[in-house]
Amino acid sequence: MNINKKDLLVWVITLGVPLCIFLIPTNEVFTREIRLFCVITILAVIMFACENINQTAVSLMLPVIYIMTGLASANIALSPWLTSTPWMIFGALLFANIMESTGLLQRIAYKCLILTGGTYGGIMIGLALTGLVLNIFIPSQACLPMAVLAYGICRSLNLGVSKASTGIMLSAAAGALLPLMFMYSPSVAVIYTAGMTVTGKAIPSYLAFLQQNIVSVVFLILMVFIYSKMFKPNHTIDGKEYFQDKYAELGAMKLSERKCLGVGIFLVIAILTIKYHGISMGWLFTFIPCMCYWPGINIGTKEDFQKVNFGILLFVVACTAIGSVAGALGIGQIIATMALPIVSDKSMLFVCGFVWLLCMVLNFLLTPLAIWGALTVPLTEIALSIGLNPEALYMVIYHACDQIILPYENVYYLIFFSFGAMKLADFAKGMAVKMAVNFIFVMVFLIPYWYLVQ
């Protein structure tokens, strides 16, 4: 049997890296449990990245291996199923299928293409602006609407799984997530709330937060521009008249489209009024699309359910299980304790750079929420001891926790990846460039800007 040299190298890396970790001696900090967790997790991550074993099979095995080895109980390893995240993604994928089968997805996508000028760059700019506007009304909750819209555009352009699709999906992700770096939101509030236990200072107002971080709008513009150059389509997309003709071919809106639009409007209203009814967006995105199967509406089909990629749901659960098990093992607190002596009595620039790197590395094992919980309080104390405004450090933490390479590291980017329009290699390449640009941006622009506005 002939063995491909490339495949052999992939398998050497896949097995060799975890083996090297397994050979590291254990101690009171790096315990046998933590070592075993690192071996299993890194093995799975490499398999996800190299795609040398079916992704769904690895996704199914990972939480089960945590249970079988005694690293975590079933209620911890499988706890992601008890959150809204996988159900939310299921509902979004189902609704996208129903929108497509009724024709509404194509109608909305063509209209968006016409409004953005029908060019590839115009689409990306339009998506970024749409995300910016959505974050004014539904801060921290724009991901799913933006992912569905971008996916619809990719499908309407018949881009398939391609670089062009990657550019569109990542621009939509940038529009949904990067405005949170200068527009106050519930997710940012988590860090400020934790820091209040040390500083006693009130959380800044919306306008104060905007003033302190408005320079980050440059990062959003920069990333959309970079993606437009990195992921150019193989053929020119420049046909406003073509899309106008395709839109005209759809004719008058059918009854099934009107019903689907009605369900979609109801979903948007439900999202906009969350502060009144208190129901999480995740459960809304699960429940409301299923209304398409109700008597009187009845626009959903059996095929729409069958077309949902259930392997993606297993992937989502496996990814979030990594954070659940790591949190249960106390990895975040251990790393925080080890990091404190390194940053004590150091300069502001060193502290900011180290904190950015620390949070970025921790993203591989922990969720952003776990990182914020473990690091915010001790880092706030250090910031005060060296005369650094803790609020500047909070934004360094927030920027760093947004930097990932693989989709499992952050559930929001995982949502965009879960629609299946991007190759993992292209996604990782786009994220790696974003990471490098962000580090330079934070150190060269954000920190000096904070000096000016204080």
Image (cartoon, rainbow, N blue to C red):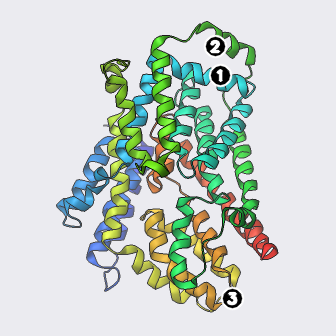
Please tell me in which quadrant of the rendered image residue 245 appears. Answer: top right
Marks 2 & 3, CB-CB < 8 Å contact: no
Coordinates of residue 221 in the picture (x, y in percent): 74, 48
Q: Is residue 221 above or below residue 258?
A: below
In the picture shown, does residue 64 fall above or below 162? below
Crowding around mark 2 (Cα neighbors within 10 Å: few <14, some 14 to 19, many 20+) is some
User: On residue 387, which mark appears?
Assistant: 3
Residue extending farthest to the front is 276
- Quadrant in the rendering for residue 122: top right
Residue 232 x, y percent position in the rendering = 68, 34
SS under mark 3: loop
- Please tell me how crowded label 3 is: few (under 14), some (14-19), or many (20+) other residues with Cα within 10 Å: few
Say which residue label 1 marks: 111
Nearest to N terminus: mark 2 or mark 3:
2
- In the picture, which quadrant includes the N terminus? top left
Q: Earlier in the sequence, mark 1 or mark 2?
A: 1
Disc 3 residue type (three-letter) = Gly
In this image, 165 relative to 35: left or right?
A: right
Residue 247 numbered tag = 2
What separation in Å lies between label 1 and label 3 (alpha carbons)? 52 Å
| Residue 54 pos. (x, y %) | 33, 40
How many circles with numbers are drawn on the protein? 3
Give the amino acid type for the residue marked by disc 2 in the picture: Tyr
Residue 176 in sight? yes
Regarding residue 11, the answer to whether it shows in the image is no
Residue contact at pointers 1 and 2, CB within 8 angstroms: yes
In depth, the one of 349 and 258 nearer the eye is: 258
Looking at the picture, which amino acid does disc 1 mark?
Lys
> In this image, 408 relative to 134: left or right?
left
If the image is split into quadrants, where does the C terminus sit? bottom right
